[in-house]
Image: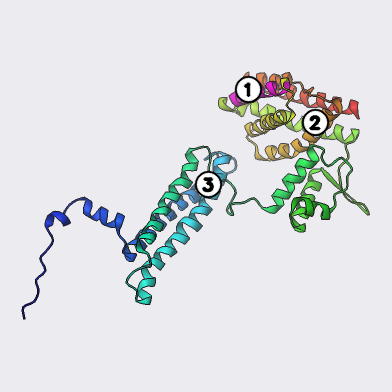
Amino acid sequence: MAATQVLPRPKAYDDTFWKPISLWLTTTDHKLIGIMYMVTGILSFVIGGIFALIIRLQLSQPNLKVVDPETYNQMISAHGVTMIFFFVTIFLTGIANYMVPIMIGARDMAFPRVNLLGFWLVPVSIILYYSGFFSGGALDAGWTGYAPLTEKAYQTLVHKIVVLELAPGSVLTEGRLIHEMKIGRTPIREAIQRLIAEGLVTHLHHRGMLVAEIRAEDVQQINEFRAQVEGYAARLAATRMTPAQIEELQRIHTVLDRSMADMDAEAFVAQDRLFHELLARGAQNRYLEATLLRLYNLHLRLWYYLYKKQGGLRETVHEHQEVIEALVRRDPDESERAMRGYVMRLARQIKDII
């Protein structure tokens, strides 16, 4: 009995440039799909390693400017997402795709075309995630992808205290805060301890936790310290701020002026915070910046107290302009004088009311 001879396929079929490409793009072979998963995982590992390298370079020396703070936070999140979801998960999925059918004696995975579709959704999702870097900012919520509950409790309490929703002297009851914020006891306790350290909450024996009172003595001490610290920050910023940062300060000042004319307190406060944060960043001293950001919440509570007592916005925006003009001239002495004058004038207004 003669053996059946199988005729070879035409060379035109096997030797075309697109044949290997189309094979990989459209294959339903579980082995090839597994290999594509693993190769994608390895490429993601390389990308995650590049993120890690940039992070370590940024931390190699104090105040090194490899990337700006926003991009650094985005890279921390991107490194975590890449290593967990784009490397470990995908690489293990590739191994499973390759090995499991062989181990159980199956011809292929169930629903091979769905298996192929599942793979091609992976590079699409990777591209969508990394496109955030080029479209306004990627995820910047740390490794876990969500802010810790302590931070949520802290931010909520800070807002309530600063805008005087929690009045000075009011008692902070854990049970009521747990019920209102739907957060456990431990995060709330940690947030309150942080607020005690920042001077927004006081702990009195036999009375518990209270929102700090606003007293003339405290106003004087807060603003004396703030005038010295923020005045020095303005002095440093006069020689260290970039032209782009000064232009941004001028833009913020324009919005501040418009917010004051519209009597929009929330917009005014938002822009005022941006103004002082940018000034602190422009000093290029991370310890000074951290101190100023903590002081700002104390200042903002005093500002809201003044605003509610006066019944309108009487903030003198032109004092911001004096600071900006001194920064534009790169005059450290005048920048420091203007900022100290601004802080102390606000302190006198609050003391007159108290």
Tag 1's secondary structure? helix
Q: Residue furthest front?
A: 111
Distance of mark 2 from mark 1, alpha carbons? Answer: 22 Å
Disc 1 marks a residue whose amino acid type is Gln
Q: Residue at x 81, y 26 (%)?
A: 346
Report the span colored magenta.
Answer: 246-260
* Secondary structure mainly formed by the magenta segment: helix
Distance of mark 3 from mark 1, alpha carbons? Answer: 29 Å
> Residue 36: x and y, percent?
35, 59
Residue for badge 2: 303
> Residue 54: x and y, percent?
50, 46
Disc 3 marks a residue whose amino acid type is Met
Tag 2's secondary structure? helix
Is tag 3's residue or tag 1's residue first in the polypeptide sequence? 3
At label 2, counting other C-alpha atoms closer than 10 Å, the crowd grade (few under 14, some 14-19, many 20 or more) is many
Q: Is residue 162 above or below residue 174?
A: above
Any mark on residue 250, and which?
A: 1
Tell me the quarter of the picture where residue 182 sits: bottom right
Rendered image coloring scheme:
rainbow
Callout 3 touching callout 1 (CB < 8 Å) = no
